[in-house]
Amino acid sequence: MATAAAAKKVQDFVFEWEGKDRNGKPVRGEMRAGGEAMVSASLRRQGVLVTKVKKRRMGGGKAIKHKDLTVFTRQLATMMRAGVPLLQAFDIVGRGSTNAKMARLVNDIRSDVETGTSLSSAFRKYPLYFDALYCNLVEAGEAGGILETLLDRLATYQEKTLAIKAKIKSALIYPVAVLVVAFVVVAVIMIFVIPAFKEVFTSFGADLPGPTLLVMSISEFFVAYWWLIFGVTIGGTYFFFQSWKRSERMQKTMDRLLLRVPMFGPLVNKSAVARWTRTLATMFSAGVPLVEALDSVGGASGNAVFAEATEKIQKDVSTGSSLTMSMQSTGVFPTMVLQMCAIGEESGSIDHMLNKAAEFYENEVDEAVKGLSSLMEPVIIVVLGSIIGGIVVSMYLPIFKLGQVV
């Protein structure tokens, strides 16, 4: 517990320092450490005469997102491939970042590396940003002397994963935005428009059709409890997504449900398969043992069903079962992936075949998103047209009835 607390403290604080080097030239910089004494001692070992040390809490700037980490990995890989020394590469990336928090994170990692910590160990101090897969690949690159190669593969993997997430979000944004606008429009009609019609119809003193009475009753409920309707809708939506995000049981339930939802289910399934195969291929190509690689694969798929399947695969493989047979026993992987995996095991090129499967399903996700977008438009038009049209017709029925009487 004490070690974890100390690690958190080191992670949460950064020190700005000023001083003079051996030649008397003013120098300044930032360093992450457990206290001012540690900063001063570290700088003295580097021949810096410290004149000022100031502790600053990690704050300010936008939150660090997956896109920031992907750009960071790609920049670092590119500069190392170009022969730029690691510390200098960190300086360039840190100064070029437009996100203040990301820049400080890069500077903190650089300080660790500068004091002799391995790059993978420096990354492991920030599990919120660098997961086990990331750190394991960096560690494998350091051990094998191919760090720039594995960073390049890692950057490619992150870019592919980010692209899949972006495509799924783009497929969901349109229908969600339309439904929100539709709800607001219906609420405005019910609260402001229908009451005006009600006053006109009341003055007629005639019996109103059933559909008109139903719409007017709904309008009365909206007028009386509009605050409750909006509160329950907004609060319920917020509570639902927070539960989905924080509750493991809720995540498993929703992940299973999403795979069965018409239209969206196949897209979610193809996305999970693409990420699963891409992750395992990346780990294999780095030389990570299969059982160890499977530790990171399940969570990277982004779906609890595939995560549970991966745990079962890992247990089966550790007892001597082949990867293909273990995958087949879970019942969640398509036949094509199983066949390509079997060919890879026979030929000794599992990483190559899994990469081919990942590329295929990434293309399938592209096509599914395009097809879903074109399919959702007529469905949404029919649904909205039925709702709005039903309201309009129900309000004009009394007028049509009066016209017939006249």
Image (cartoon, rainbow, N blue to C red):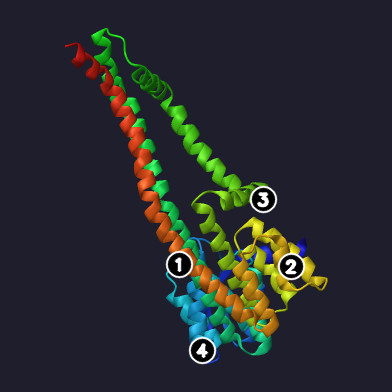
Q: Which x, y percent locates residue 172? A: 44, 53
Q: Are marks 3 and 2 in contact (CB under 8 Å)?
A: no
Q: Can you give x and y, in whole percent of width and height, for residue 179 in the image?
A: 40, 42
Specify few, some or many for label 4: CA neighbours under 10 Å numbering under 14, 14-19, or 20 or more: some
Q: CA distance from mark 2 to mark 4?
A: 38 Å
What is the spatial separation of the Cα atoms under label 4 and label 3, in whole angstroms?
Answer: 41 Å
Quick one: label 3 or label 2, which is nearer the N terminus?
3
Q: Residue furthest top?
A: 205
Residue 248's disc is 3
User: Relative to residue 51, is residue 312 depicted above or below?
Assistant: above
Q: Secondary structure at mark 1?
A: loop
Please give the label number shown on residue 99.
Answer: 1
Residue flagged by tag 3: what amino acid is it? Glu
Q: Position of residue 267 (x, y in %)?
A: 51, 58
Q: Quadrant of the C terminus?
A: top left
Q: Residue at x 55, y 72 (%)?
A: 358
Mark 3 falls on what kind of element? helix
Label drawn at residue 81: 4
Q: Residue at x 46, y 81 (%)?
A: 92
- Count of marks placed on residues: 4
In the displayed structure image, the side of residue 389 where residue 249 appears, left or right: right
Answer whether labels 1 and 4 touch (C-beta < 8 Å): no
Q: Disc 2 marks which residue? A: 326
Q: Which residue sits at x=53%, y=37%? A: 236
What whole-number distance in Å separates the C-alpha atoms at marks 1 and 3?
31 Å
